[in-house]
Image (cartoon, grey):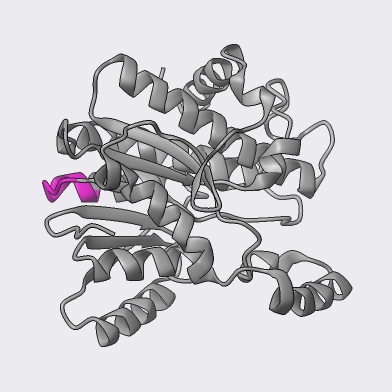
Amino acid sequence: MPRQHGKVAIVTGGGRGIGYEVVRHLARLGAHVIIGGRDEQEGLAAIKRICEEYKEAKVEFEKLDLASLQSIQQFAESFKKRNLPLNILVNNAGVMLVPEGRTKDRFEQHFGVNYLGHFLLTWLLLDTLKDSGKSDHVSCVVNVSSSVHSIGTIRLNDLNSCQHYSAHAAYCQSKLGQVLFSSHLHQQMQREGFPVVSCAVDPGMVDTALYQHLCAPLRMAQSLIARLLFRTPEEGAATVLSAALSPALDGDPAGGYWANGRREMTTPSTFDPQLPLSLWEISLQLLGLQ
């Protein structure tokens, strides 16, 4: 992996799991990393562990609640006031299979946190990403999605799952949304000539706290299976890092969808030119950005 001295990265949900491993490795490579998360105690504990391992690590924590549009706006404003570059944005935080509920702004939780919160964060930081990129060192947005995007369905007339709620369907929809958002953003940046690439990543089946909302029998089964078949958070982070650092590795600004450490094909729905555009426009309307 290339050294990242002088580079600045933001990793949402960087206090544990895959996000923590991404932060740890970026810090080891010399990047200045900002963890965006809800739990300050968890974030500070993560920083302490990283700094004990790498004495010169430059890592900090900033409060960010992706279930609150106000919190996202405050995080972005605070960052931009510092006049730092932004070379890497890793949209990693997320929820999975949570009981039916709403964010502070009345969006369904999977859609609001996994997709819409990261959409807004990226939008607010996009000018900084554009300004920080160079022709030979482009800025990079990485959305941590999942293989379940392949069975997801975007219900443009019911993005908040008001007509019928299924935690699994809502989660799959949010992950497909991330893939579509990544694709549309990348195409838009390339079309307009900005030095920004965007990609979505499937880290694989990783043993993290995301499974905490499974019912007790399933959670017990998952914990047993995870020891045999699941990847560790560090292994899951490897593909995220490959995607984030690939422009620096090979000078190829292709973006795309990443799994198992390399680019792979996605599902047919992601090739529909109208669906990503429709979702993009509806997202702007929901957030009052258009």
Where residue 158 appears, x then y in whole percent? Answer: 73, 27
Of the pair 184 and 248, the residue shown nearer to us: 248
Outermost front residue: 250
Residue 71 appears in the rendering: no
Which x, y percent locates residue 194?
24, 24
* Quarter occupied by the N terminus: bottom left
Q: Taking 236 as reference, is 163 above or below it? A: above
* Residue 84 among magenta residues: yes
Most foreground residue, 105 or 153: 153
Q: Locate residue 124, reporting x and y percent.
A: 32, 35
Specify whether residue 100 is painted magenta: no
Q: Quadrant of residue 108?
A: top right
Compared with residue 164, is residue 277 higher up or lower down, i.e. above or below?
Answer: above
The C terminus: image quadrant = top left
Locate residue 248 relative to residue 135 in the image: left or right: right
Which residue: 50% across, 30% down? 181
Task: Give the residue drawn at x 27%, y 87%.
Answer: 52
Q: Residue furthest top?
A: 274
Q: Quadrant of residue 225?
A: bottom right
Specify start and end residues of the magenta stretch as a single range.
78-85
